[in-house]
Amino acid sequence: MIKRLVLFLLIFTICVSPRIPLGFIPGGRRLDLRIEDIIVAMLLLGWALYMSLKGRLYLTPIAKPLGFYLFISGLSTVFGTLVWGLNPMRASFYILKEMQYFLIFLLVANWLKTPHELKYVTVLLLIGGLVNALWVGFQLWQGTYRPLFAIALTESYGEMGPPRFYGPALLGEYSPLATGGFFLIVLFVSLGLTVSVSNRYIRCCLIMFSGILFAALFSSLSRATIFGALFGILILLIILKRLPLLATMFVIFPFILWFTQAIPVAGRVFNWEGFLYSLIQDRWEPIWQPLLHESYKGILLGFGKSSLGFLPFLISEEAHNYYLRVLLEAGTFGFVTFLWLQLRIILLSVRMCRNSNLVISKALGIATLGATTALCLGAFFQDIFISVKVMEPFWILVGLMTSAYKIEVRMALNRS
C-alpha cells in the first residue's frame, strides 16, 4: 500500500507539478525546483538505506553504456572547469539534473518486481496523460493557453503568457517542446497497449485514447515531437509487421485532429518550404555553423556540461540539436557513448517486443521502442533529451521496460 501511494505521488507530481523559481545561478541560468525533485530525493535516500542493509542493486542491461556516458560527462565537465573556466556551481546543477533522470530509471527498474506493479505505474502514466489532455482541450475551447498551476512561466514568454502561435500548455508548464514531448511518451505507452491487448473493447478504447493524445501532441505545434512521433510509429509498423492496425490509426488520427480543431494550424506544421527556410535562417546560420566551427577545440572530451551559453565562443545556450550539444559538451567520446546508450535501449526494446510472454512486457517494449526512436529523430531539431517534462516520463518508461525484462528472465528460469 505504501509503495503504491509513493508511486502515485511520484507520477502525479511529474505530470502536474509547476516550476518553483529559486533565483539564478552563475551565467544567467534560472534555477527552478519542482515538487518531484523533493519526492525523488526522499525516495533515493530511503532506497539507498534499504539497499545498504538488505538489497542487491539490479544494474539493468543498459548499465555499461549508461555508466560510460555518465563517467565521460563528468570527466569532460571537470576538464571544462579546470581548462575552459566553467563555473563549478552551474556545471554541477546540469550534471545533477541529468543524474536525477538516471536515478529515477534505476529506482523504477529495481523497485518494481511484479507484473501488477508494472501495470499500476503504466496506468498512472496514462491517467497523467489523460488529465493533461483534458486541460489541453479546455484551453483550446477557451482560446487561452497557459498552465493551470503557474508559479513561474518560462522567461521567454513573459508575464502575460505564451505567444498565440504556439499551442496549449501542460498543467504545470508552458513549453511547446515539453507539451509535445510529454504527450509523445504517453502516446507510445497507449499504442504499446493497443497492439498488445487481446480484448477488442479495451483495444477500441485505447485506439480512441491514442487519437486524443496525438491530437494533444499535435496542438503543441512542436515539429520536433510531431515528426518524431510519426517516425516512431513508422518504425513500429516495420518492426511489428502489424500494418492493418497501425495503418488504421493513421486514418483515424486526422479525424480526431479535426474534431479538436487542430487542423487549422496544420499548415504551419507541414509547411515544408517554411520549415527548410527556418532550418537555414534560424538554426544553421546563427547557431549550428558557429558552434560547429568551435567544436574542434574540444573534439575528444568537449567543453563540459553547461558550457553552451557560458563560454564566450559558444554563444547559444541551446544548440537546437541534441547530438551537436553532446558533441560540444562531452566530445567525441561522449557522443559515441550517448549513441551506444540509445542503441542499447532500442535493441532491448525490440527484444521485448518479439520475445515477451506477458502482455504488459510486450506493451512496454513497444512503447519504449517507439518513444526512443521518436526522441532520437526529434533530437536533430531540439535539445529534447534535457527537457524535464520529457525526460522524467521517458526514463520511467525505460525503467518499466527493464524491470519487465528482469521479470521475463526470472519467469524463463523458473520454467526451466
Image (tube, helix red, strand yellow):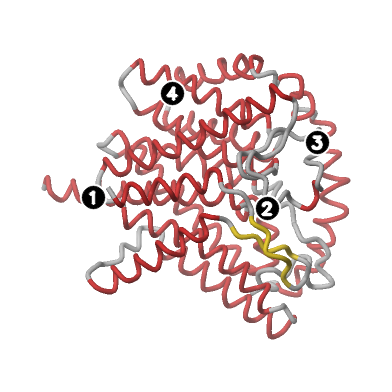
Residue at disc 4, secondary structure: helix
- Please say if 283 is above or below 242: below
Q: Which residue is located at x 35 percent, y 48 percent?
A: 5
Query: Could you tell me residue 415's position as x and y percent?
Result: 12, 45
Task: Specify few, some or many for label 4: CA neighbours under 10 Å numbering under 14, 14-19, or 20 or more.
Answer: many
- Please say if 57 is above or below 143: below
Under mark 2, the amino acid is Asp
Query: Which is more N-terminal, label 3 or label 2?
Result: 3
Residue at disc 1, secondary structure: helix
Q: Which residue is located at x 67 percent, y 68 percent?
A: 329
Residue position marked by numbered label 2 in the rendering = 383
Determine the CA span between mark 2 and mark 3: 17 Å
Task: Specify few, some or many for label 1: CA neighbours under 10 Å numbering under 14, 14-19, or 20 or more.
Answer: few
Task: State which mark lies toward you, 1 or 4.
Answer: 4
Query: Could you tell me residue 206's position as x and y percent?
Result: 43, 23
* Label 1 close to label 4 by CB (< 8 Å): no
Residue position marked by numbered label 3 in the rendering = 275
Task: State which mark lies toward you, 4 or 2.
Answer: 4
Determine the CA span between mark 4 and mark 3: 32 Å
| Disc number for residue 206 | 4
Determine the CA span between mark 4 and mark 2: 30 Å
Q: Quadrant of residue 335?
A: bottom right
Residue position marked by numbered label 1 in the rendering = 409
- 400 or 143: nearer the viewer: 143
- 9 or 121: nearer the viewer: 9
Residue at disc 3, secondary structure: helix
